[in-house]
Amino acid sequence: MSRRDASAYGSTALFAADFKDDIAFEQIVDARLWFSTGSAFVTGWVNAVFFIRYSAFASMMSGNVLMLGISISLQLLSWLGHEQVDPDSHWLSKVPPPSLYILTIAGSVAGAMLYRLLAKHRQWTPGTFGPLIVLVAMLHEGVEHFLYGKELHIKTHVTFFAPLCGIMNSIALDGLIVKQNPYCTTANIMLLGHTAADVVTGEASYRDKKACINSLCMFLAVQLGILCGLALDLTTGEYWDFELTVIAPCCAMLYYLHDHVQPSTLLPLDLKQPITGS
């Protein structure tokens, strides 16, 4: 594919041009980039909705671990008679009890165990889990809306979704294509700085630049997912809470496409030379 042809695909190709001839456009749109970017978008959407509803994260366990520490500390200080919070940090008075985060983390571990058992001993693939994710999301939001109406946001209900999020994380970490967290982590952010330094000194390899592009796309996709999830939540009526039902089919489609990518079509991660097109 020529650079002129690539420009027809929009800003992604223009961004690729910044790396001159080290990375061809074909590498930017390979399966790894699109699956990790799509997973990051879904993760941003789901976690934004979860944090608004339940004050906990769906699949970002590092966030739940941090919130667990804060919640435990506040609980201990309260037992010792220090119940006042800093006037500049009133949000601390609304932090859920430690049990919420413990159950959420435990549920995610249970989901990872279920994924491992079904994938290893029943040969379940990401595409097999897709309909399960859609079914759970639709049933939960439908039943909860019927039973509770606008009171859907009961914080303890996050534990019902925790195993599902453990499965989603496991698919990305253990999958054929990506094998990394389905969102932009600290490692991804640090990689941007490290690669930028190596580009300046001329020491950045093809693999480094490719990983840098992947990290940047994941970062932007998470932000876009958060924006879309929040926009849908804030612009819909008080009695409409089906943000997870909307995003679940997108997640299932992503996993279906994952199953239909043949390993032979993926580029080796250690490829150093650019692929040129006509």
Image (spheres, helix red, strand yellow):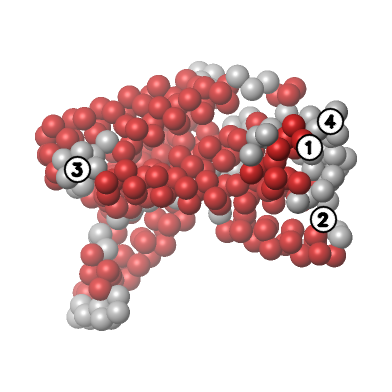
Q: Residue at x 34, y 32 (%)?
A: 246
Mark 3 or mark 1, whichever is nearer to me? 1
**In what element is the residue under mark 1?**
helix
Q: CA distance from mark 4 to mark 2?
A: 23 Å
Which quadrant holds the C terminus? top right
Q: How many marks?
A: 4
14 over 194 or under it: above or below: above
Q: CA distance from mark 4 to mark 3?
A: 50 Å
For label 1, the residue is: 3
* Sooner in the amino-acid sequence: mark 1 or mark 2: 1
Amino acid type at circle 3 is Gly
Decide: few, some or many residues near mark 2? Use Cα within 10 Å; few <14, some 14-19, many ≥20. Answer: some
Decide: few, some or many residues near mark 3? Use Cα within 10 Å; few <14, some 14-19, many ≥20. Answer: few
Q: CA distance from mark 4 to mark 1?
A: 8 Å
Does any portion of residue 7 appear in the rendered image?
Answer: yes
Of 20 and 191, which appears nearest the observer? 20
**The image quarter in which residue 173 lies:** top right
Q: Which mark is residue 277?
A: 4
**In what element is the residue under mark 2?**
loop
Q: Residue at x 70, y 45 (%)?
A: 14
Q: Which mark is residue 237?
A: 3
Decide: few, some or many residues near mark 1? Use Cα within 10 Å; few <14, some 14-19, many ≥20. Answer: some
For label 2, the residue is: 204
Q: Residue at x 20, y 77 (%)?
A: 83
Report whether 258 appears left or right of 198: left
Q: CA distance from mark 2 to mark 3?
A: 50 Å
Amino acid type at circle 1 is Arg
Amino acid type at circle 2 is Ala
Kindly check if marks 4 and 1 are in contact, taking CB atoms under 8 A apart as contact. no
